Image (cartoon, grey):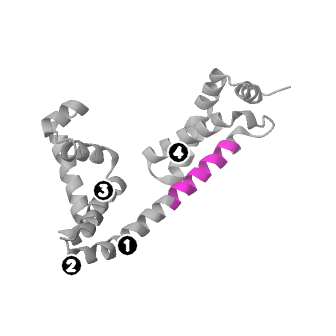
């Protein structure tokens, strides 16, 4: 006799979205807690859990209904956690190299090559180091030249929140790009 989970897996292999949704709701809470425990960041954990289920759906034809589904999603999420940690390690190494990269630019900021490096450094700092909300507000302000009130209206947040996020962005960027200032 097949267990309910095996039946769901067989239906998922046949691209049954309802069965996948049922399995998702069964396993999401436990997997989420498991990933939060490993990552220690709820937003990143939620992204990893979502990516885990996306990968399962994309590879549904290869599902083995004789194996534990939770062990499969735990393995996929573990690999995604490792990827996250590797990415974080690279970011840290990149940060450690930033001062050395920028100190040579301070000597001759007029050169076009150095200006391009500075622009690239600013762009990398914005994309790699600003939190998502902060980056979005910063880019709306600086790239699209929106006023704080326009940004607040666009994102349905208070003007004060916009000001706080811009202050935070500039503080982070000043710290990262201090050799250019």
- Give the residue displayed 53% in from the left and 38% down from the top: 50
- Disc 2 versus disc 3: nearer the observer: 2
- Give the residue displayed 63% in from the left and 21% down from the top: 18
* Mark 4 residue element: helix
Query: Where does the image place residue 80, in percent across and percent down from the top left?
Result: 57, 50
Would you say 24 lies left or right of 103 here?
right
**Residue located beneath label 4 in the image:** 48
**Residue located beneath label 1 in the image:** 97
Tell me the distance, in whole angstroms, between the alpha carbons under discs 2 and 3. 21 Å
Q: Which mark is residue 136?
A: none
Sequence-wise, which precedes: disc 1 or disc 2? Answer: 1
Would you say 38 lies left or right of 147 here?
right
Which secondary structure class fits the magenta region best? helix
Q: The C terminus appears in which quarter of the rendering?
A: bottom left
Tell me the distance, in whole angstroms, between the alpha carbons under discs 1 and 2. 18 Å
* Mark 2 residue element: helix
Observer-nearest residue: 25 or 109? 109
Observer-nearest residue: 148 or 26? 148
Sequence-wise, which precedes: disc 2 or disc 3? Answer: 2
Tell me the distance, in whole angstroms, between the alpha carbons under discs 3 and 4. 26 Å
- Disc 4 versus disc 2: nearer the observer: 2
């Amino acid at each position: 006799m097949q267990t309910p989970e095996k039946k769901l897996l067989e239906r998922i292999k046949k691209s049954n979205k309802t069965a996948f949704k049922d399995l998702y709701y069964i396993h999401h809470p436990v997997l989420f807690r498991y990933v939060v425990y490993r990552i220690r960041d709820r937003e990143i954990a939620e992204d990893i859990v979502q990516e885990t289920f996306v990968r399962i759906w994309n590879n549904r034809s290869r599902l083995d209904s004789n194996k534990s589904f939770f062990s499969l999603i735990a393995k996929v999420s573990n690999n995604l956690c490792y990827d996250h940690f590797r990415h974080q390690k690279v970011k840290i190494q990149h940060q450690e190299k930033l001062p050395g990269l920028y100190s040579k630019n301070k000597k001759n900021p007029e050169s076009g090559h150095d200006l391009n490096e500075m622009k690239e450094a600013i762009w990398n700092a914005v994309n790699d180091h600003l939190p998502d909300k902060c980056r979005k507000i910063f880019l709306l302000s600086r790239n699209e030249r929106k006023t704080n009130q326009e940004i607040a209206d666009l994102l349905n947040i208070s003007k004060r929140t916009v000001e706080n996020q811009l202050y935070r962005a500039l503080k982070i960027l000043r710290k990262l790009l201090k050799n250019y200032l």
